[in-house]
Image: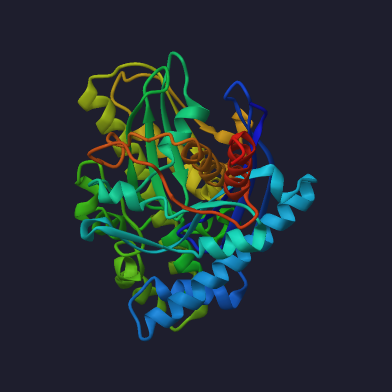
Amino acid sequence: MASEYYIGLMSGTSIDGMDAALCEVRQDGSFACLKTLSDEWPEHIKGRLHELCSSGPNELEKAGTAQNAVAAFSAVLVNRLLELAGLDPAQITAIGSHGQTVRHRPEKGFSLQLDNAPMTALLTGIDVWSDFRAQDIAAGGQGAPLTPLFHAKCFARPERWVFVVNLGGIANMTVLAPGGKVELGFDCGPANTLMDLVCRELFNRPYDEDGYLAQGGITNAAWLQAMLHEPYFIKPAPKSCGRELFGREFIAPYLDECLKTEADGERRRLGADLLHTLCDLTAALIAADIKEFMYNRGINEAYDVILCGGGVRNTALLKSIHNMCEVCKMPDGPQHSVLLCSSLGIDPDFVEAQAFAYFAYLSSHGRLCDLKAVTGSEQPVLLGSFSPAPEGRFVRSCSAAAAARAAAAPEA
């Protein structure tokens, strides 16, 4: 079998844009990312997607038009990526499209990612896998996080424990035993989503570029302690979360305290304090989860913390993570290192897009995924629903098989 090509599409909880990754799966099973591309959502689409994350009037109509906009945007990004790579749609086996999560309710049996995979397939001429969480939830799982399966392929160390932390809108953690077995995977809690919300409401900015604003503040200990009382943080894994829990309501008292201040300078100072506090919240959760896992398993071996996702560009958040991992380390505990995945040659912005290209590969070959240690699902599942393109690989394979059967059939 020659190399196969797959494209992964990802738009995260922060709703800032979509990432695309063109990946190759070689004959020996090795995986390589060849090209990447990212683009910000147009303001009208971004506004609609943010709006749909909360209940409101006329949701069905808005969701229908939004999912078509997601599909059209996906197709444009895919076609641009193919042009950059010098490849034709016929050379791509499949697209893995995550869609845009607007409601994550695994306790109610669903997680909604806005997408229109048949439309994307039609506009690109490439078969599409989508709706990756549905079957896992049907099997009793959380439906998220799914990326630990890919983390195991990329970040496993033969003789070292590894904690992979994705700093997206939500921070999620994968625990890899030496050799790469996935021991655990779960959502730690909020990361960029709350910081971005503060930036939009207090600074009229989409996000805190390089952590500049947070670096100008200090942690408000009272705010931090109040946030840490959220019951989700002590809930055992498997667990997953989203903006339903960590949205404006979660930080409303602190946001409102900033907003009621009339002096612009004082409002900005309090806003910077809130951003710094949120950095420490994310870091404290990550460090505490690592410490708890090591203690509960009685592990006293060296380990690595590998950071990926958009949050790695926030220097204030990175500093908090380094500090908290040191503070939370057990007395005389094992040595650890905190690394960016870029130091391993993997672009932190495109890990999740690559993951969905990988999932498209697994599903295209009928490979079931055992996510019990991550999502709690009761049986292995096939990730994604399949939407064939009229001229895609699936239809071409069916046509070729039919022609072969006809040629082999005896004449009447």
Q: Which quarter of the figure is the N terminus placed in?
A: top right
Q: Which quarter of the figure is the C terminus placed in?
A: top right
Task: Write the residue at 25% across / 46% down.
Answer: 139
Q: Quadrant of residue 204?
A: bottom right
Task: Write the residue at 47% across / 19% down.
Answer: 157
Answer whether residue 286 is visible to the viewer in this image. Answer: yes
Up the image or down, 110 lies above or below 356; here it is below
State the residue in front, 244 or 218: 244
Return the residue found at the far top.
159
Apparent side of residue 379 relative to residue 311 in the rendered image (left or right): left
| Residue 198, horizontal then vertical, whole percent | 45, 68
Task: Write the residue at 33% across / 46% down.
Answer: 188
Answer whether residue 206 is visible to the viewer in this image. Answer: no
Q: Quadrant of residue 13?
A: bottom left
| Residue 64, horizontal then vertical, whole percent | 46, 76
Q: Quadrant of residue 250?
A: bottom left
Up the image or down, 100 lies above or below 402; here it is below
Apparent side of residue 124 relative to residue 317 in the rendered image (left or right): right
Scheme of colours in the image? rainbow
| Residue 187, horizontal then vertical, whole percent | 34, 46
Up the image or down, 16 lies above or below 316; here it is below
Up the image or down, 376 lies above or below 326; here it is below
Apparent side of residue 98 relative to residue 347 in the rendered image (left or right): left
Task: Write the residue at 56% across / 42% down.
Answer: 354
Return the residue found at the far front.
412
State the residue in front, 185 or 61: 61
| Residue 194, horizontal then vertical, whole percent | 41, 62
State the residue in front, 278 or 346: 346
